[in-house]
Each structure stands twice: as C-alpha cells, then as structure tokens.
Amino acid sequence: MTRLVYRLVYLSRAALRGLQASPVTSGVASVTLAVALVLVGTFLLVVTNMGLLLERVGRDLAVTAYLEEGLSAEARRDLAQRAAALGGVESVEIVSKEEALRRFGERVGGAALLEGLEENPLPASLEVRLDSEHRSATAVRAVADALAGMPEVEELGSSQQWVEGYARARGLVRGLGFGLGGVLALATLLIVANTIRLTLLARRDELEILSLVGASRTYLRVPFLLEGILQGAAAGAIAVALLFVLFRLAVPALGDGLELFLGWSDPVFLPWGQALLLVGGGAALGCVGAGLALSGERLP
Amino acid sequence: MNRSGAVVAATRGDPLIRLFHVSKSYLAGSYALHDVSLEVAKGQMVFLTGPSGAGKTTLLKLLFAAERPSEGQILVLGRNVGRLRETAIPALRRRIGVVFQDFKLLPRRTVEENVALGLEVLGTPPREVRGRVFGILKRVGLQHRRHHHPTSLSGGEQQRVALARALVNDPAILLADEPTGNLDPELTVEIMDLIASQAVRGTTVLVATHDRALLRRYGKRTLRLEDGRLQEDVPAGALRA
C-alpha cells in the first residue's frame, strides 16, 4: 500500500516534469481545450438561467377555471372541493365576480376606470395552485384536463402554454449545447491526443530507460494519462475563469436584450457544481485524449 | 575450444543463465545468433567477445528480454525468457542491471535522479532512495557529483553513473554492452575494476567487449562469438596476460 502511494508520488512528479519539459505545446493544448469548454459553458450558463426562470414561473403556476354564469355560492364551494381533491393541487381559491373586478381594477390602474361599466363582465373563477412537486407543464396539463371535464367550468386559463414553449426552447438550447460540445470535444480530444503523442515521442529515451530498470507498462503510461488530466483540468479552470469574466462584462452590456431572451433581468453565474463539472469534463477529455495517444503508440 | 552448441559447465554455484540451442533471426534465413548453448553460474564474470555483428548485443538483449529467441530456450534466474508474458518482463528486469556503451542517461535529470529510477519504479520510500543512491554513488566515487546533470560530467563519470543505476537495486545479474567503448584506456580500467568488483560480491556479470587487452588483463572466462555462432569458450585464467 505504502509502495503504491510512493509510486503515485513518483508518477505525479514525472507528469509534472513532462509538462515542464514542453510548456508551449502543453499550454497551447490547454488553451484550445479551454476555448471549447468556454463555448460549452456558455450554453450551460444559458440553460441554467432558463431553468431558474422556469422554476420561478413554476412557483406562481396556477390554473384558472372560469365558471359559468349564475352558479350559486354552494355550487362554487362544491366545485372548489372537487378541484382540491385533484392530484397535485395545493390550494383552491374561489374568486367571485366582484373580487375579479376589484383585482382587474387594481391591475389596470384604479377603480375610476371601471366606473362607467353598467354590469360586471368578469366571470367568477377558481384559482387552482399546485404543490411544489407538481409544478411542471405535465402536471398543469393533467389538472387542466380534469377541470375541463367539469360541466360548471366554462373556460380555462393558465401559463401552461408559455411554460411548455419555454421548456422546449430550453431543451433546444441544451441539445445545441450538447451537440456543439460533443463536436468540439472530439476536435479537442484529437488536439490533446496529438500533444501527448508528441510528448511521448520526445520522451522515447526516457521510456526505454524506465523499461530497462523494470518499469511496468502501467508505470510508463500513467504519467501521460496524468499529464492529459492535468492539461484538461487546467483548461477547465481557465474556461470557468474566462466564462466568469465574460459573464461579468456581457450582462450589463446586453441589458434589455438579455431580459427579452431570458425573460429575466438578473441572470446568475454557473453554480459551483456546474463549474466543477466543466473542470472535471476537461480533465476527463484530457485523460481520454492521452489514452487515445497511448493506444496508438507502441511503448518500449 | 568447444564446438558451437556445446553446453559449457558452470564453474561456481548454480547457473543463473542457461541457453539451449538458441537462435535469433531478424530476416528469414539470416541469423544474428545461431544455435548457441551456454551456462553462466552465479557470481561468475564472463566476457563476451567477437567482431562487430558477431551477435554479442543480440545475446545480451535476449537475456533481458528486449528480444525473444526465434528458436531454443533461455532460462534466466529460473525463468524461461522466451515464454515470459509481457507483464512478467518488468519483474525480471528489476533483477538485472544493464549498462550500455552510450550510457543512456537522462540529460534533464541529475545524477541522483538518474540513479534513483530503478528504486522509484519499485515504489521505494524517498528517504530509502536517497540513502541507497548516496551509497552506490559513493561506491563509484561520485557522491559529490550527485546534484550535477550528466552533460556536465566526463565520459568516465557518466559511465560510472550508468553503472550505479544498474547496481542500485543490487541485481543478481549485471549485463554490460561495450561499457568502455567510448572511454580512454585509463577510464576503461577504472570502470572495469568496478564491474569486476561486483562479480566478487556475488553478482553474475556478462560483459560484451572487443577489447582484447581487457580480456588479457582480467583473465576471466571468455565466450567468443562469430557470425552469430559460439566459436570458443575460454575458461578463466587461460587468457591472463
């Protein structure tokens, strides 16, 4: 066990030596990988913010069931009880015609505007709110379908369609991100692989000597894999830093445009978990690239 | 003189190296080594001589499994080298020290780091590595140069570093391929004395050389190869100057 630890220490030292021996080549590979990761990170950032917006809208998500004219107070209560019994419903509020008019008046800027009305044109309604576990487009649709089946309900209104459309847009952005990320990852994988291959060729003598003194194939390979991982992780860290700087510069500059696109004027940076995911992703790419280089070369 | 193919009896202890009708061919019909049989006992020092292309280097390469025999069997430290799995080769090499004419030192590493390679491969603790490296460098008279890089050393010093690297693991067998080929006569004797002292300590030593003066000076058992065949097996003392 202890010997294994010491071996790892020696191998890590060898990997660092390898990077020091060819700083320019390793640096270029890391920066190229970082650029690719910045692009992937940008998509991640957009998708994260779109997700947060969906979550926020979801919190206010309600289905409004407009009731037929002339329904008695008892019938409304009965209907409200039936609606409350539906799966995923947290609360049901009965909004009378008068209350509806009052709220409308508040919303449009004062009761004075409504003074000319001879009769209240607004219907009574039920405002059905979902519990936290059911604030999704699917759950909203299920509740709306159930309400639509009730004869006393004349019409339904909800932000369901908007939520569905926005969720689709987020899915599209995520898909684009993954697609572009995949292509870029493949390209950068080849760059890392070629960098490691060059290092491998430059250190052929060293490998030969290590092999002579009894180094196993694993012992010969591990420093190169570590180099790939270090290059990739460094690229990930560079990408997160670059992304942060770009985020700080872009958010004030884009201003209203960003709000139009994201529907939110206060976007947030990537959470720690996702930032670490970028670093980890870079490290994984570096490792796979190094593995690719090693698989194509015959070691002494 | 023994005919090619004859098995030479070991003179001291159990044989650590045994070759049975070994041939090595790189091209069909052309042999680098042809039907060679021999034994080398534990602690024995043997010179391998012959003109360039005689098969000396090929024979040494077969012993540390850098090459596989085309025909015949090779037993080194009780292991059949020809049938050794790739994964088992490192374990064999850890018990064999190898020295080359061109030293094969890593120029970017210090003397100490070059010598430590064989110990690091085994996962030896750093404190022990430093102690053992210092000890072996002291034996070859280079402890004061341990922080230098090989490029700042003379040829003789570089070969002493290579020798220290080969011996730091206290190997059972030491193979030296023209170890003095790049050195002047004075340094040649210095290096050969160090190698010969290792045999006295119980290491089996095989030295490939075409330097006849060395053969006479040390008077050790000498195997003469020519065109890949073992032409002569001269016992120790027969060539003493």
Image: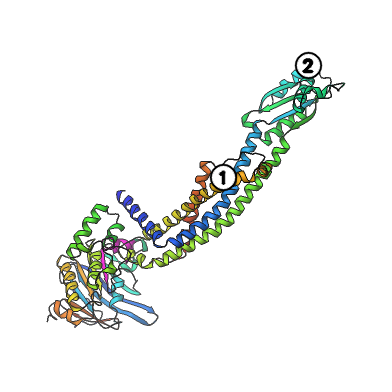
Q: Tag 2 or tag 1, which sits nearer the N-term? A: 2
Q: Quadrant of residue A56?
A: top right
On residue A27, the disc is: none
Q: Residue at x 17, y 79 (%)?
A: B215
Q: Residues within 10 Å of mark 1 (few under 14, many from 20)?
A: few
Left or right of residue A279, residue A106 in this image: right
Left or right of residue A238, residue B38 in this image: left
Count of marks overlaid on the render:
2
Image quadrant containing the N terminus of chain B? bottom left
Q: Which residues are magenta?
A: B88-114
Image quadrant containing the C terminus of chain B? bottom left
Where disc 1 sits, the SS reads helix
Q: Residues within 10 Å of mark 2 (few under 14, many from 20)?
A: few
Tell me, yes or no, whether the highlighted magenta stretch contains residue B89.
yes
Q: Residue at x 21, y 59 (%)?
A: B134
Horizontal and vertical percent position of residue A46: 61, 45
Horizontal and vertical percent position of residue A300: 38, 67
Q: Nearer the viewer, mark 1 or mark 2?
A: 1
Q: Which of B146 and A206 lies nearest the eye of the viewer? A: B146
Q: Quadrant of residue A248?
A: top right
What is the three-letter code of the residue carrying label 1? Answer: Arg
Q: Is residue B163 among the parts visible in the rendering?
A: yes
Q: Is residue A135 among the parts visible in the rendering?
A: no
Horizontal and vertical percent position of residue A269: 56, 42
Q: Which of B97 and A283 lies nearest the eye of the viewer? A: A283
Q: Which of A165 and A240 lies nearest the eye of the viewer? A: A240
Left or right of residue A152, residue B198 in this image: left
| Chain holding disc 1 | A
Q: Is residue A26 above or below residue A176?
A: below
Where disc 2 sits, the SS reads helix
Q: Which residue is mark 1?
A: A248
Q: Which residue is mark 2?
A: A73
